[in-house]
Amino acid sequence: MNNIHLEPLGKGIEIYVSDSYHFSTDTILLADFSLPKGRKKCAELGTGCGTIPLLWLRHNKNLEIDAVEIQSDACALAQKSVEYNNLGDKINIVNADLKELKGKLSFGCYDLVVCNPPYKIGGGGITNPENAKLIARHETECTLDDICFTASKLLQFGGSFCICQRPERLADVMESMRKFSIEPKTLRLVQQRTAKAPKLFLLEGRRGGKKGFLNVLPTLFIEDENGDFSEEMMKIYGCYKTPFEELK
């Protein structure tokens, strides 16, 4: 791993990132959209360098989090951040394939599962020759069905599954959720600015939820009419001050 360094996440929390393992706007938005309130048992599938668990704990220390990641280098980096922030009693880094969690995590007991999945179908688009980025961006190690199946197994009845994806895959995500008894319940589109089409959606589903109602929230705009960060984005961005990337 090259260029390993600390970046601030606010409220005294810092994270180790590298050229291969880092975070984007999408990560920050998913962490905010899924932010658990109260005492909860949570899991992240494909945690990368562990950004979402750290962002959650920045706001709520009453969480028990299992963070699953298939890449050992990413796990080592995430573990380094956990130890640096003295959060070993809150975050458990699990180096495993999300398709093979039986016996590694307890099924049917999580209040919340989240995933920022690969955006491109395996074999689709231009592949990235760097393996870490290939796994992050293309469905080489898991599919949407793999993710939704595992989320459904982990969640207790009524538990929430939150995911972000590109708008062109909205039908795929909803179809996969329903296939594994997760009913889509809350949807939010994300646009860079008003003149642009949405580039991301955030979706929350409930394990065993009743069919027939989807709450569509107002669109989240990254920028205002002047090209600066919108007021809502600044609230989400909070006390993390380093400029972050465009939507990946």
Image (cartoon, grey):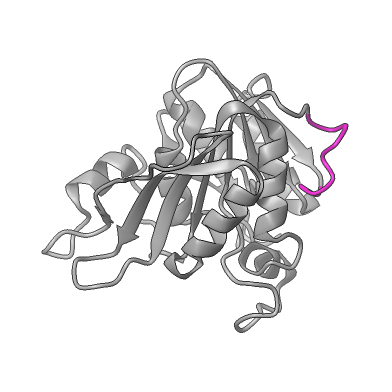
- In which quadrant is the N terminus drawn? bottom right
Residue 30 or residue 71, whichever sits in front: 30
Residue 236 position within the rendered picture, expressed as x and y whole percent measured from the top left: 32, 41
Q: Which residues are magenta?
A: 97-105
- Residue ID at (44%, 32%): 35
- Residue ID at (41%, 64%): 247
Q: Is residue 164 above or below residue 183?
A: below
Q: Residue furthest bottom?
A: 126
Residue 34 position within the rendered picture, expressed as x and y whole percent measured from the top left: 46, 37
Q: Is residue 199 above or below residue 59?
A: below
Q: Quadrant of residue 86?
A: top right
Q: Residue furthest left?
A: 226
- Residue ID at (59%, 71%): 120
Q: Residue furthest right?
A: 103
Q: Is residue 39 above or below residue 144?
A: above
Residue 165 position within the rendered picture, expressed as x and y whole percent measured from the top left: 49, 59
Q: How many marks?
A: 0
Asked whether the viewer can see residue 79, the reply is: no
Asked whether the viewer can see residue 107, the reply is: yes
Residue 101 position within the rendered picture, expressed as x and y whole percent measured from the top left: 82, 39
- Residue ID at (45%, 48%): 203
Residue 111 or residue 177, whichever sits in front: 177
Q: Is residue 236 above or below residue 164?
A: above
Q: Main secondary structure of the magenta part?
A: loop
Residue 13 or residue 144, whichever sits in front: 144
Please indicate whether residue 101 sits to the left or right of residue 190 in the image. Answer: right
Residue 1 forms part of the magenta stretch: no
Residue 104 forms part of the magenta stretch: yes
